[in-house]
Image: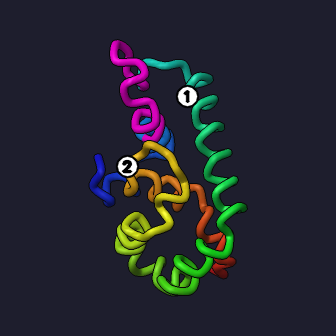
């Protein structure tokens, strides 16, 4: 599932389950996340999304410089979406989030939620 094409084409609900699975790996070895109630998944996603929002706020300058300016996100994301995900996941900003989620999965999720488009103020 870590294949970028798969991450970007599955439903958002499936990606959310993958994100929660990554976050909770080892917490519930006897129960898969897909067996959780939707409310339990949403509660875990709220924690994850809060951490993402806090990171964007606290590290505003670094993320802007690395993603919006250096990687020229707004210009490149339309035609090079998968490349952008890989570049961002491989950049130094990934450690800022401090989440136990595979970088590709985390960045694909953040991109699907529209954080980078809003943050970089893309016009598309």
Q: Tag 1 or tag 2, which sits nearer the N-term?
A: 1
The figure's colour scheme reads rainbow
**Tags 2 and 1 in contact by the CB under 8 Å rule?**
no
Query: How far is the residue under mark 2 from the one under mark 1?
Result: 18 Å
Which contiguous range is marked in magenta? 19-33
Q: Is residue 87 above or below residue 25?
A: below
**Residue 22 part of the magenta-drawn span:** yes
Q: Is residue 12 left or right of residue 46?
A: left
* Residue 119 image position (x, y, % from top left): 67, 70
* Residue 26 image position (x, y, % from top left): 37, 25
* Residue 9 image position (x, y, % from top left): 38, 54
Q: Secondary structure at mark 2?
A: loop
**Residue 53 part of the magenta-drawn span:** no
Residue drawn at 42 percent across, 45 percent down: 101
Q: What residue sits right under mark 2 in the picture? A: 102
Q: What residue sits right under mark 1 in the picture? A: 41
Residue drawn at 52 percent across, 80 percent down: 73
Q: Which mark is residue 88?
A: none
Task: Report the quarter where the C terminus lies.
Answer: bottom right
Occupied quadrant, residue 83: bottom left
């Amino acid at each position: 599932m870590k294949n970028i094409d798969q991450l970007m084409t599955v439903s958002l609900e499936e990606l959310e389950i993958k994100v929660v699975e990554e976050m909770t790996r080892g917490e519930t070895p006897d129960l898969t996340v897909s067996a959780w109630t939707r409310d339990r998944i949403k509660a875990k996603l709220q924690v994850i999304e809060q951490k993402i929002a806090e990171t964007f706020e606290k590290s505003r300058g670094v993320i802007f410089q690395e993603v919006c300016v250096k990687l020229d996100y707004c210009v490149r994301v339309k035609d090079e979406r998968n490349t952008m995900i890989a570049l961002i996941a491989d950049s130094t900003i990934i450690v800022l989030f401090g989440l136990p989620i595979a970088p590709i999965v985390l960045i694909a999720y953040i991109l699907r939620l529209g954080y980078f488009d809003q943050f970089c103020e893309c016009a598309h």
